[in-house]
Every structure is written in structure tokens, then in C-alpha cells.
Amino acid sequence: MNVADLKIKNLVEYKNQIYNITEIFQDNDGKNYFVKIENDIHSFSVPAESIKPIQITEEWLEKFGFSRTYSSEQRIRYERPETFIKYDIDLNSKKSWTD
């Protein structure tokens, strides 16, 4: 995982378990990045490249209190009851990489 994308409190996957990032740091040589991760059972540090991002799915959004409030061919919107907490999925922005 690209260390520039990591933030404290991000949820990540490590060895098929979900963890919260609590710290991001470099080794003494300043060459390698590590993250301290924890969940209800474990807390330890691992190399940053060994963790995986969690794909945002409808299931994850619902776990965090979001519900689908709008759906069309172009967009799906999930909202939480609090004001201004929305997550829009743009269905038209299909990214393709070309050489």
C-alpha cells in the first residue's frame, strides 16, 4: 500500500483481520515505513507494504450508519443522519489506464 495514502484512523486489512492505523513511522535508516495497527484483540507494528486497503462497499457504509438515499444510472448516494455527511459514487467515472 502506498504510504502517502495512509492516515491515522484508517481501517486496513492485515492477515484477513481489520485494524485501525494508530501510528505511521519510518525505521532508523529512514528507508522503510511502518504502521502501528490495532483492533480489539491485537496491537502491533508491521511494514506499511504488508497492509491492504479496505474496499468501500455498501456493506461497509451500512456498518458505519450510512443508508442509500438516491440511486440513478449516473450516481448512488449514501447519507448519514448528521448534516452534510454524504458519500456519492459516480458511476460515470470509469477510469482506464493507457500507455
Image (cartoon, rainbow, N blue to C red):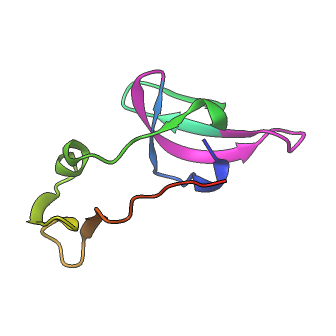
Q: Residue at x 85, y 41 (%)?
A: 31
Front residue of 34 and 41: 34
Highlighted range, magenta: 15-34
Front residue of 99 and 82: 99
Q: Residue furthest right?
A: 29
How many numbered markers are drawn?
0
Instruction: Residue 97 in the image: state x and y as whole percent.
Output: 56, 54
Instruction: Residue 48 in the image: state x and y as whole percent.
Output: 64, 37
Q: Residue at x 9, y 66 (%)?
A: 69
Front residue of 85 and 23: 85
Instruction: Residue 82 in the image: state x and y as whole percent.
Output: 17, 72
Q: Residue furthest bottom?
A: 83
Q: Residue furthest front?
A: 99
Is 61 placed left or right of 37 in the picture? left
Q: Quadrant of the N terminus?
A: top right
Q: Residue furthest top?
A: 15
Classify 23 as above or below 82: above
Q: Is residue 26 magenta?
A: yes
Q: Residue at x 16, y 55 (%)?
A: 65
Instruction: Residue 45 in the image: state x and y as whole percent.
Output: 62, 31
Q: Residue at x 51, y 44 (%)?
A: 21
Is 88 placed left or right of 22 in the picture? left
Is 1 placed left or right of 80 in the picture? right
Quadrant in the rendering for residue 7: bottom right
Q: Is residue 7 magenta?
A: no
